[in-house]
Amino acid sequence: MAELDADLGHIIPSSVLAPFWAKLVVGFVSLVCFARSYDGDFVFDDSEAIINNKDLRAETPLGDLWHHDFWGSRLSSNTSHKSYRPLTVLTFRINYYLSGGFYPMSFHVVNILLHGGISVLMVDVFSVLFGGLQYSSRGRRLNLAPRSSLLAALLFAAHPVHTECVAGVVGRADLLGALFFLLSFLGYCKAFRESNKEGTHSTFWVLLSILLGAVAMLCKEQGITVLGLNAVFDILVIGKLNVLEMVQKVLHKDKSLENLGTLRNGGLLFRMTLLASGGAGVLYMRWKIMGTGPPAFTEVDNPASFADSMLVRAINYNYYYSLNAWLLLCPWWLCFDWSMGCIPLIKSAGDWRVIALAALWFCLIGLICQALCSEDSHKRRILTLGLGFLIIPFLPASNLFFRVGFVVAERVLYLPSAGYCMLLTFGFGALSKHTKKKKLIATVVLGILFINMLRCMIRSGEWRNEEQLFRSALSVCPLNAKVHYNVGKNLADKGNQTAAIRYYREAVRLNPKYVHAMNNLGNILKERNELQEAEELLSLAVQIQPDFAAAWMNLGIVQNSLKRFEAAEQSYRTAIKHRRKYPDCYYNLGRLYADLNRHVDALNAWRNATVLKPEHSLAWNNMIILLDNTGNLAQAEAVGREALELIPNDHSLMFSLANVLGKSQKYKESEALFLKAIKAHPNAASYHGNLAVLYHRWGHLDLAKKHYEISLQLDPTASGTKENYSLLRRKLEQKQKKDV
């Protein structure tokens, strides 16, 4: 490999070739590229995997992590995505514990540091892939390709396609999977350091490598593919097998097959048996844990996999591969989501996009031919290992073995990009060797590194909050309904309903079966009192997806507003049938019963809501108010005290219970609760007004006057407060006359 390194001498100066300095430079570059994301928010999938994931909280037993998927659902559930990554979830839980809550900065810093560590490890990995495996007499591995390994590691550290993994907190699964993937590979290399005698190995390190591969899989599924890469490395580098020569001997029925005998005697078959049996055992355990079989994805997640024609599926899968290759080659157009019409299906050979997959296979076949047929053994080895690192980790995302839940996903390119960087480095070396314009090649390489670093920093900024992230996708995937949906949702959360409606309508136009967009649009229209259109949208949503519980509940709310009470009750009941633990639906059902004066049914519904969600303040409040209004003061007081024990800092509950205590002539306790509620929410006019009423009844007229006046300052239109204040003033005037 001295020749390739010499060809790169004008690009990589000798001053940074010492291992320490090389790793320091790579680590620094990796941190600079993604440091901008350190103070970003939780965005996109972070909400479900972290904020809404009960497995991060201390009250969830640690043992549950081994029975739940990445999102906190039980693996045995039919709705589970079957993404089994307990070690990644464990690191989230540690993050949550150490930072004292959901503070995104600590989560982001860990991701950035992980990428830095992986990039540094890549220097060692590339030195083995480029320079082979040789040890000194003291057992230290020699770096025979310092320039090649440094350049490839820099290209890896600064590749913009990594932004999703580093800047998105859920990308930690890919980072941890990659970390243990590389440790497994380097561990496998250590199996051959004990002696320079050909064919010897340490079984301990082989077994440890398999164990690290299993750990990688428990972080991200594709981690197990390291065993395949180890096998390829063993055959080509340790066994020095010439694949083309062997194939030729087999085809010509050459009885000598000397290489095969050498490898068998050297222990290759034993190591292959260990790798194969270890991999099979780990995969079997993974399948058993998954429980109910593979996850069920929908057509919008991966439309090509639902195509009736095998030819159409094959063409589109290959087109997806070409898009992934393009993202590695030119990572300028990046998007957080590539589903829902972002990439229309190729349905005929006349589609011009077929050129892309033809170009991909033209390049791949050319590289494979060079990897097999080149007379240069070093070239054969580098190209084969580069292709192996590019293809093997990508296989779980290829749709070849099972259907995946995405079209294109930048996160799955984290490990394959190492193979691309290796091939690119080899290409730069070959170009430099065959041209006299070496300074031009150096300028191009440095230019690519600089542009990639700049793109990483820009893209990291886009991942800092959801608004920038979602809007950045509009120009990349304008046909993606999910992009428009997410932009609309972000606008709705900020209170900009008019703009949100526009994006929701566009999402429904692009995907007429997008039930979540219909549900959210129906909700906004309901709030704007456009009830007829809201009912039409929500009815269509539940017709398309009959088990969509949230849409059924929202349809019930709209029907209740339209005074169609029987239909509303039926909609609520249907929602609860599809989602038994649905406290918000029980709350709304209780409101319906209260409107119909079915007080017992209302109380039962609200009680169900509080059983399912003890912190459901609205349900507790409604129970207290209904019992108060119907004269059941003792029961209202009992419910209020029970609620405050569960939610001691809820000022609305303090206010409701204070009203009940006041009516029960428990003035001192009522006063204390009113004052505590006012301290928590000092600008609530009703709190001051009702405290004034309490003082009025209690005979503390000056205090009553003070709080009536505060209440009227906060809300001058409150007619009840005005009337009570007038009564108090007359009473005070009469008292003054009497005193005079």
Image (cartoon, rainbow, N blue to C red):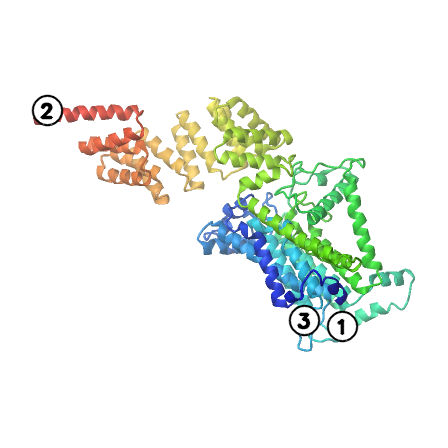
* Amino acid type, residue under disc 1 in the picture: Gly
- Indicate the amino acid at tag 2: Lys
Callout 3 amino acid: Arg
- Dot 3 or dot 1: first in sequence order is 3
Mark 3 Cα within 10 Å, few/some/many (few <14, many 20+)? Answer: some
Q: Is residue 418 visible?
A: yes
First of labels 2, 3 by sequence position = 3
According to the picture, the residue beneath numbered tag 1 turns out to be: 199
Image point 89% across, 69% down: which residue? 256
The residue lying toward the viewer, choosing from 60 and 203, is 203
- Name the mark on residue 141: 3
N-term-proximal mark, 1 vs 2: 1
The front one of 317 and 541 is 317
Mark pair 3, 1: CA separation: 17 Å
Q: What residue is rendered at 49% in x and 32% in y?
A: 496
Q: In this image, 67 relative to 1: left or right?
A: left
Q: Secondary structure at mark 1?
A: loop
* Residue 737 marker: 2
